[in-house]
Image: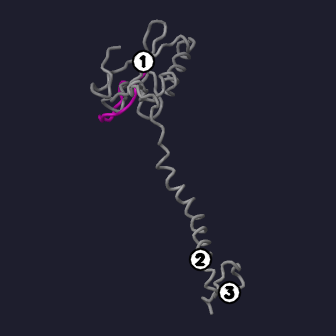
Amino acid sequence: MRNEPRIGDVPKDMTPTDDNTDQSTDQSKCSHHRAAYLLPVLALTLTPIFAGCGSEATDPGANVSDVPTSSSPTPAEDPKVAAAIADLAKRQGVKSEEITVVSHDKVTWPDSSLGCPEPGKMYTTVLTDGVRVVLEAAGKTYAYHGGESGPVTYCENPQEPVPGEGSSDAPQ
């Protein structure tokens, strides 16, 4: 009795009939019901596959190398550069518009001092990824060093980063 269907709770068009003449219409109703469930499932399944279609260049003469490949921010948009500019403007009493970004490089520092060791302090000798921002104001350059994360700080006596791919070896 537990697994027996209660016919009173089932809609009339879904109850089994003894009339075999209506089988073809019942089957067509079932196929319509299946299609109603299948179409949304197919749409959700196939949408990601076809999402990229049509995004190719429409100009057959377009050169792929003309398309920018990097979306990295300009130096002024980088929060570390902006912080360095703000600090130098305050430190030197100049407007931020009077400060020029000479360079902004990802570098590898030779130790945890980030290229700006303080006298009398000990530092872990481990290669450390970071950044170097060099700014110019009133004809003088100023170095800001930092790690990969965290802020950059003014470095009065800057040291050079480790030479290599991640470092800019250009003289300042």
- Which residue matches tag 3? 6
User: Mark 1 — residue?
Assistant: 134
- In the image, residue 161 lies at what x, y percent? 32, 25
Figure check: 123 above or below 3: above
Query: Quarter of the image containing the N terminus?
Result: bottom right
Residue drawn where x is 46% and y is 49% of the image: 49
Residue extent of the magenta highlight = 118-134
Looking at the rendered structure, the secondary structure element under dot 2 is helix
Residue contact between numbered discs 1 and 2, judged by CB atoms under 8 Å: no
> Which residue is at a point 72% across and 85% down the rendered structure image?
8
Q: Nearer the viewer, residue 134 or 1?
A: 1
Q: Amino acid at mark 1?
A: Val
Q: Which mark is residue 125?
A: none
Write down the quadrant of residue 25 in the picture. Answer: bottom right
Residue identified by numbered label 2 = 24
Q: CA separation, marks 1 and 2?
A: 81 Å
